Structure formats: structure tokens, C-alpha cells
Amino acid sequence: DRASAASVPLRAGALADGTAVPLLANVGTHADAEAAVTLGAEGVGLLRTELLFFDWVVAPTVEEQRAQYTEVFRRFPDQPVVVRVFDVGADKPLRFVPTGPPEPNPALGNRGLRALRRNEWLLRDQLEALALAQAETGADLRVMAPMVNDADDAAYFVDLAHEMGVQGVGMTVEVPSLALLADQVLEFSDFASIGTNDLTQYTMAADRMLGTFPQYQDPWHPAVLRLVKMICDAGAAAGKPVGICGEAAADARLAVVLVGLGATTLSMTPVALADVRAELALHTLAEARMLAARALQGRTAADSRARASVALH
Ligand code: PEP
Ligand code: MG
């Protein structure tokens, strides 16, 4: 019956040859977290904490934050939960974070870690709340920062996280400068998670909020794929995991290509988990690498997609 079928655990993400590819969920609300569990996510690959507090006028206290994080962590006992500290500014303003006067190009201005460095009290409170929620639940917590530009930004974040009692510290790689410097940053951070939405926007200089140039605002673009490969290669050389947390991981065929490029985990909107799980199971790692090699040779996003979509056999 339906009730017992729903309680059978869903298969873990894996390629046809058995290579494990943990399939994680992007979560911004408690409803998302519940859906992630129901749809068989193997953990959370991106908790967008700014969405938990998007309508707050006054900054949440450490205690108010701890309560929210604890509620999410309790749904994922024994599974990794990757929390991104507030990605404030640009497309996600928070009323309780002063980001200054409106900017002509907000995506290029005071957002993410840049805004947090200017409001360090907020970052300290958040890290403290995360450490408390971790201690309370025993969660397999990892924390990452958004909009990191270089090793100086990354070292600032790692040091502050450690000071506040948080271990397992990584970076969202979504600015091309950080992709180019991934080897430097992975020397001292524990993991990287590629945000393909912003990485595409910034690599292609195509505003993700406008959608007026869909041929550029497309993670299949070979320029984006080459940066993804560069980050994954740096992760492999450093022995550090590199996940994907942008929407690209929800495109089943692109998910296979991303694994072929070296991604070790994929995080996506929960409704995409079933399709991606099914597509991964059709290809071996050797095949995924072949598809990735083809996609890297594309001339445009459409060309890379077409090259990776023809049958291999
Ligand atoms: C991204 O940029 O790909 C990402 C995962 O973060 P967001 O979409 O929240 O900016
Ligand atoms: Mg982003």
C-alpha cells in the first residue's frame, strides 16, 4: 500500500558501475526540508539561510536562529547538512542587514560575504547559532560562505568559523576569480560547492535576473563547464570534495556531465531528485567522463548540450 511504499528508503545516488554520487537537496524552508526527506535526499547540500529569515525586519537573535537550524538538522540525522551563511544583497535583500544605498549593479556590489564582512556581528551570531544547533543535535554540519572572491576572503571565513566553534568549513565557488584560484583555497578549506547559477551569470556577464540572453545564461556553456572542470581538478589534487549546488545539477543530462567533470556530490531542488537518480544509473563513470569531454569541446551552450546528448553506443 501507499504508506508502506512511502516508507521504503529510496535508492542512493549511484552510477551504473556503482560509483556513489550522493544526491542532496537545496533547501530554503522547512517545507523544502520535509520534501527533501520524502523524496530521498541523502542530506542537504545547500541550506539557503537567508530564505529562512527573508521576511524578518529585526535581526534574529542567536537563540532564534538556533531554534530554526535545530529544526532543520533534526530531519537529517546521520546525513550531511551544508549550511550557507546569509547570502544577502542583490536578488536576496534582508531588511535587517544594512547593505547601503541602492547600487546600479547590485549583483556586482555589496552582497554575500562582502556584506557579512561589513556586518561582522551578524556573521558571528550566525556561526554561534550554528555551532549551538550542531552541539544540540549532533548534526553532520558543514558551513560555507557565498560570494567569496579570493583566498583572503576564504581565510577570513575559515578563521572566524573556527573561532566561533564551527568545523567543516568550505566555500561556494560562484565567482570566476575563486574558480581560477580554487587550488589556493582548497589548500586550507575543507570542501567546495559550485554555485552554477551565479558562476554562469558572472562568467558569461549575463544577468540571471533578466533572462534576456538565454544563450549565455546557460550552465551548459563550455566556458562554464571548463571552469567547473578546473575547480573539480583542484579538489581532486587537494583530496577535497567538490559538490554542485546550482540549478545545473537538476538537469539530468547535465548532472551526468558534471559528475564526468569530477563533481563528487550533486545538490538540487527536491523535485529533481528522482530524474537525476534515474539518469545517473544509466551511465558508468567512464561514460560520464566521455560525455563531459564532448561537452567541453562545444562552441556554444546549445552545441555542448547537443554533443553530450547523442547516444554513446
Ligand atoms: C548559485 O549561485 O548557483 C547558488 C546555488 O546560489 P543562489 O542561487 O542562492 O545564488
Ligand atoms: Mg549564488
Image (cartoon, grey):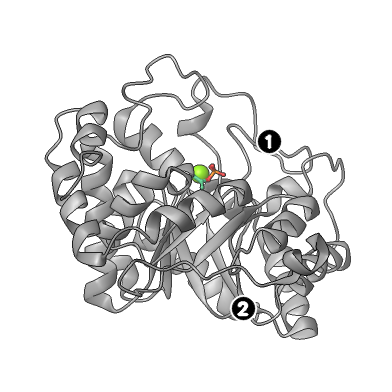
Q: Quadrant of the N terminus?
A: bottom right
Which residue in the structure is indicated by mark 2? 166
> Which of the 4 image quarters holds residue 263?
bottom left
On the rendered structure, is 302 left or right of 138?
A: left
Q: Is residue 310 above or below residue 205?
A: below
Furthest residue to the front? Answer: 1
**Residue 24 position within the rendered picture, expressed as x and y whole percent measured from the top left:** 55, 62
Q: Is residue 285 above or below residue 276?
A: below
As drawn, the label of residue 93 is 1
Provide the secondary structure element on which disc 1 rests: loop
Q: Is residue 39 above or below residue 17?
A: above
**Residue 86 position within the rendered picture, expressed as x and y whole percent measured from the top left:** 65, 52
Say what amino acid the circle numbered 1 marks: Pro
**CA gap, disc 1 and disc 2:** 25 Å
On the rendered structure, is 306 left or right of 266?
A: left
**Residue 79 position within the rendered picture, expressed as x and y whole percent measured from the top left:** 62, 77
Q: Residue at x 49, y 24 (%)?
A: 105
On the rendered structure, is 114 left or right of 187?
A: right
